[in-house]
């Protein structure tokens, strides 16, 4: 099919923009992109879809989220949340222990649907639910497949719920990694090995994880120094900082996602750089948990590739970009910082980081890339050019303006309507179940 009558931001190497553009999608892949007159002349027999002048961009990539937290929206918390550890114990770990496999599935549907509505076409998730471990990643996969969203999944291994559950968590990660090696649903579902954080992982558990991964893969997805307490714990128990400790276990690799990094020091940054390990920045979550601002600007100065996620604070990457911009400038006490770095993190680094997990590029509109594309009802009242479209993306665009979402060459949302599933019915089930969950938290 050919998408025509649109303004196209390609985010390609040449930063091309086509003001009366067209995109030829063949199967799951972008076959051609350019001026509408030229594309239509080259492929006269193809189906044409008139986008009515809408703005078109590559789909957004969310580099870190927690689908299991979906029921928390509107939920009251009765126990203290006055520091980071209390937030974890009295909110998130209390919630995740209540989840059944049915809840996992409902959370997946609602999170994926809202992500699609906000223009997210690839979502990388870090799952938890100690009383519904077995089959949980497969439930997340099935919802993603049903809706048609691209995803990468793992289960966060931890000692916090005992050794029996820990062993189930290792098995779920390994079973899912093996399943994805056999069938990744047409390069739509990928697997990593999830680790919670250093302070909930003993040396014995890290050894078991490493042994289980032997010969399979070296890609881990792990929280790094989100709270200062995590660093204190590592120094007290192991005599070394978190990144140093994880490096000793072979966990810091180019295929690993090091998430947060709020309290890492220069030595830890050097280790991450040495291994080409990307760091995933979650600005809204860091501010909400009052854990501090990661040294993102210093990481980037050192050449560390920094990507962006939401940590499930939102499902709108445009929201996260807005907060990234002001958090970085505010923390640096320098109004010249934050803007260009945020655009680099989201539009250059996220595609760079996550394209390597798939067989083709994502996050770009160019020949040979996957056809993951979003359209906006956006009528700019200032000029939009190849030199300033980032300013429009940061200050003008929002997920609420997304009109259509195309993933892997197929519409999964058209004219703001989610296709393939009954969204209203799923939301009704989620509301009903959330009322029951809230009684347990």
Image: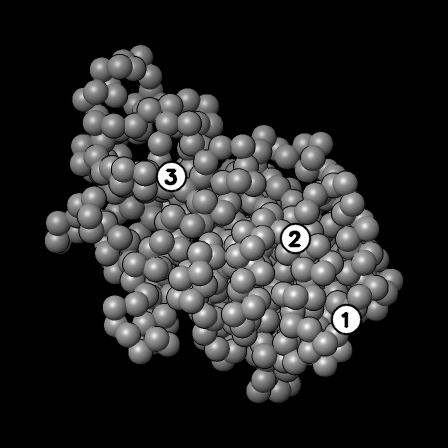
Q: Position of residue 306 (x, y in %)?
A: 46, 57
- Horizontally, residue 172 falls left or right of residue 196, namely right
Count of numbered circles in the view:
3
Comes first in the chain, label 3 or label 2:
2
Q: Secondary structure at mark 3?
A: loop
The alpha-carbon separation of the residues under discs 3 and 2 comes to: 25 Å
- Give me the residue at 13% from left, 54% from top: 381
Question: Circle 1 sits in a helix, a strand or a loop, which is it?
Answer: loop
At horizontal 20% and vertical 44% (from top left) the residue drawn is 386
Callout in the foreground (3, 2): 2
Percent of width and height locating residue 327: 37, 72
Height in image: 57 above or below 155? above
| Residue in view at x 23 percent, y 56 percent | 391
Q: Which sits in the foreground, 189 or 49?
A: 189
Screen quadrant of the C terminus: bottom right
Q: Position of residue 250 (x, y in %)?
A: 71, 54
Q: Nearer the viewer, mark 2 or mark 1?
A: 2
- For label 3, the crowd category at 10 Å Cα-Cα, with few meaning under 14, some 14 to 19 and many 20 or more, is many
SS state under label 2: strand
Which badge, 2 or 1, is on the more N-terminal residue? 1
Mark 2 — residue? 220
Q: Which residue is mark 3?
A: 364
Residue 310: percent from the left, percent from the top?
48, 61
Identify the residue at horizontal 54%, vertical 51% (top origin). 276
Q: Quadrant of residue 331?
A: bottom left
3 on left or right of 172: left
**Above or below — where is 406 with respect to 230?**
above
On the image, numbered disc 1 is attached to which residue?
A: 160
Q: Residues within 10 Å of mark 2 (few under 14, many from 20)?
A: many
């Amino acid at each position: 099919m050919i998408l025509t009558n649109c303004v196209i931001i390609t985010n390609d190497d040449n930063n091309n923009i086509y003001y009366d553009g067209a995109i030829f999608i063949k199967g799951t892949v972008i076959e051609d992109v350019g001026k509408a007159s030229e594309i239509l002349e080259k492929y006269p027999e193809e189906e044409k879809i008139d986008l009515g002048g809408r703005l078109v961009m590559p789909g957004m990539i969310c580099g870190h989220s927690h689908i299991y937290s979906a029921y928390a929206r509107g939920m009251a918390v009765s126990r203290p949340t006055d520091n980071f550890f209390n937030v974890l114990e009295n909110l998130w770990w209390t919630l995740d222990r209540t989840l059944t496999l049915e809840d996992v599935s409902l959370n997946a549907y609602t999170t994926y649907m809202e992500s699609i509505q906000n223009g997210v076409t690839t979502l990388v998730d870090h799952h938890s639910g100690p009383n519904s471990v077995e089959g949980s990643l497969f439930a997340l996969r099935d919802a993603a497949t049903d809706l048609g969203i691209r995803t990468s999944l793992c289960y966060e291994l931890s000692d916090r719920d005992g050794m029996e559950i820990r062993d189930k968590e290792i098995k779920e990660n390994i079973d899912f990694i093996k399943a994805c090696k056999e069938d990744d649903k047409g390069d739509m579902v990928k697997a990593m090995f999830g680790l919670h954080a250093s302070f909930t992982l003993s040396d014995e558990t890290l050894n078991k994880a490493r042994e289980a991964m032997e010969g399979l893969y070296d890609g881990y997805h792990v929280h790094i120094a989100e709270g200062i307490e995590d660093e204190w714990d590592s120094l007290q128990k192991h005599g070394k900082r978190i990144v140093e400790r994880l490096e000793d276990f072979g966990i810091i690799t180019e295929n690993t996602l090091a998430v947060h990094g709020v309290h890492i020091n220069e030595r830890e940054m050097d280790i991450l750089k040495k291994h080409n390990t990307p760091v995933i920045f979650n600005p809204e979550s860091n501010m909400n948990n009052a854990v501090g601002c990661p040294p993102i600007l210093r990481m980037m100065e050192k050449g560390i590739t920094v990507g962006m996620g939401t940590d499930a604070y939102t499902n709108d990457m445009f929201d996260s970009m807005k907060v990234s911009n002001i958090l970085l400038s505010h923390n640096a006490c320098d109004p010249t910082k934050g803007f260009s770095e945020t655009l680099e993190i989201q539009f250059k680094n996220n595609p760079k980081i996550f394209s390597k997990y798939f067989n083709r590029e994502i996050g770009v509109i160019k020949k040979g890339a996957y056809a993951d594309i979003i359209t906006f009802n956006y009528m700019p009242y200032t000029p939009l050019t190849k030199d300033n479209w980032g300013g429009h993306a940061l200050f003008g665009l929002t997920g609420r303006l997304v009109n259509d979402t195309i993933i892997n060459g197929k519409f999964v949302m058209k004219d703001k309507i989610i296709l393939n599933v009954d969204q209203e019915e799923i939301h009704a089930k989620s509301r009903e179940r959330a009322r029951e969950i809230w009684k347990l938290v």
